[in-house]
Amino acid sequence: MPTSHSTLAAVDLGSNSFRLQIARVEGDQLYPLDALREAVRLAAGLNGEKLLDETTQARALDCLSRFGERLRGFVPEDVRAVGTNTFRVAKNAREFLKRAEAALGFPIDIVAGREEARLIYLGVVQSLPAIAAKRMVVDIGGGSTEFIIGSALKPQRLESLYMGCVSFSMRYFSDGKLSKANMKQAEVAARMELQTIVKSFSAGHWSEAVGSSGTARALGDLIQAHGWGDGNIDAEGLEKLKYLVMKHNHVDELANLPSLRQDRAGVLSGGLAIMSAIFSELKVKRMVLANGAMRQGILYDMLGRFHHHDMRDATVLQFMKRYHIDVRQARRVEQMALDLLRQFSGDLHLDPDYPLHLLSWAAHLHELGLTVAHNGYHKHSAYVLSFADMPGFAKTEQAHLAVLVLAHRGNMEKMKGQILDSLDLAMVMALRLSVLFHRSRTDVVLPRLEAHCDGMHFRIGLTPTWLQENPLTAVALKEETKEWRKVGVTLDVESLDEFTGAMA
């Protein structure tokens, strides 16, 4: 383990709370060092048009600035920040994300619902004793609720539903008034949402139900504080708690309940309605509570990457099998593309570590779309990579991967505005040239390319005799130089003009 990874930090940007967890690394284990939490209520800032209001943005940015202060001195590789449901649904999330990253001082990954579920499961199971039986993990967040069935460390079913303690509290208890009618309406809505997963997640598919994060913990603490349980949640205790809550007239009065944090009172009713619906629809009788949650999952996922157990590599291999990708061709393309990028990166004085990983994945997946259709297969590949569930990948990583794959062949004009910096240009150039040189799809001996890059100018050196022996590739290279000119990039291949001129 490199010394730079002796301490890791995870930032969980939930729809209710923002959390920072810092841990010390010892071998394959993590030991908590520090934790910060702030109830930002990001989901509460969404208006009817699904735009985050300025007040909520300001509250979130203030929190991230404080987190950023705590993270000073950390290198980017040792910090991962993850945005969840509200980042996914807010229409102005892209603009807010730029301000959020500036405040925190680190990039923020927006993950899909099922990827959020995977990280939750990873964090939860690390905090529980190992059992052979299947578990169902439920995490009621501020804007979404994640459901996972898994065995040991492996999740087998993952789902994310758009219902959370903040969103439901705002929708069904918007004026703060508590009533049986409001609670029933919220429960019915939650039960309707659950219908899509009842068949796969109801009792009989798992042996133990596990609750994680704030809502489950708050409900368990309240049940125990009133002597109705042992700190976990059972059906009888949950019903008694619901009856107790309904004896109050306003959510503000709930702040006086024993063991309930004051910032949790305003979202308790929405979370309670969702949990009650889960118990009813999925036939849960008892739910044990876990200390682990998504922030721990983020840390363990980072640890796995450093130990070369990267979930993204496993996902790429699964996709290659699923889409029947020609493995030998993918590896041919990968080898030359990575060699070219290393040379380009040297001229650009850039760290190629992550770009090399990204380019490797793109090389392995660039022909994914051939299972759909040969014509325009690169577009099919890019579409799948943009929208498929890809465990381990953030949405930004998927988007970046899709751009590289889309650009690997065809007209370069389609990429205007999508290739934003010199490193992206270098990756696309490396991938396109490698695909071009491996058009025969055989293990032929290729020339050693001397590659150089100076901003918008690329130069490739190879022996003139090789061009003479491979006229088809020489013509293809001539066409490639024309394609790059369309986007203002110069590609010079030594001796190419003389050779193709002689052919003419």
Image (tube, grey):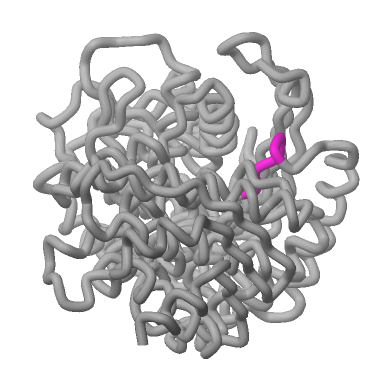
User: Residue 1 appears at what percent x and percent y?
Assistant: 66, 16
Q: Residue at x 70, y 58 (%)?
A: 40
Q: Is residue 358 magenta?
A: no
Nearest the eye: 119 or 190: 119
Give the magenta range: 77-81
- The relative height of residue 121 versus residue 87 in the rendered view (above or below) is above
Q: Residue at x 41, y 56 (%)?
A: 466
User: Residue 64 appears at what percent x and percent y?
Assistant: 79, 55
Is the C terminus in the top left, top right, bottom left or bottom right quadrant?
A: bottom left
Nearest the eye: 433 or 68: 433
Prevalent SS, magenta region:
strand
User: Residue 450 appears at what percent x and percent y?
Assistant: 60, 52
- The relative height of residue 175 versus residue 163 in the rendered view (above or below) is below
Residue lying farthest front? 502
User: Residue 13 appears at what percent x and percent y?
Assistant: 62, 52
Q: Residue at x 82, y 37 (%)?
A: 74
User: Is residue 75 in view?
Assistant: yes
Left or right of residue 33: residue 295: left
Q: Is residue 79 magenta?
A: yes
- The relative height of residue 32 versus residue 94 in the rendered view (above or below) is above
User: Is residue 184 in view?
Assistant: no
Q: Residue at x 71, y 35 (%)?
A: 78
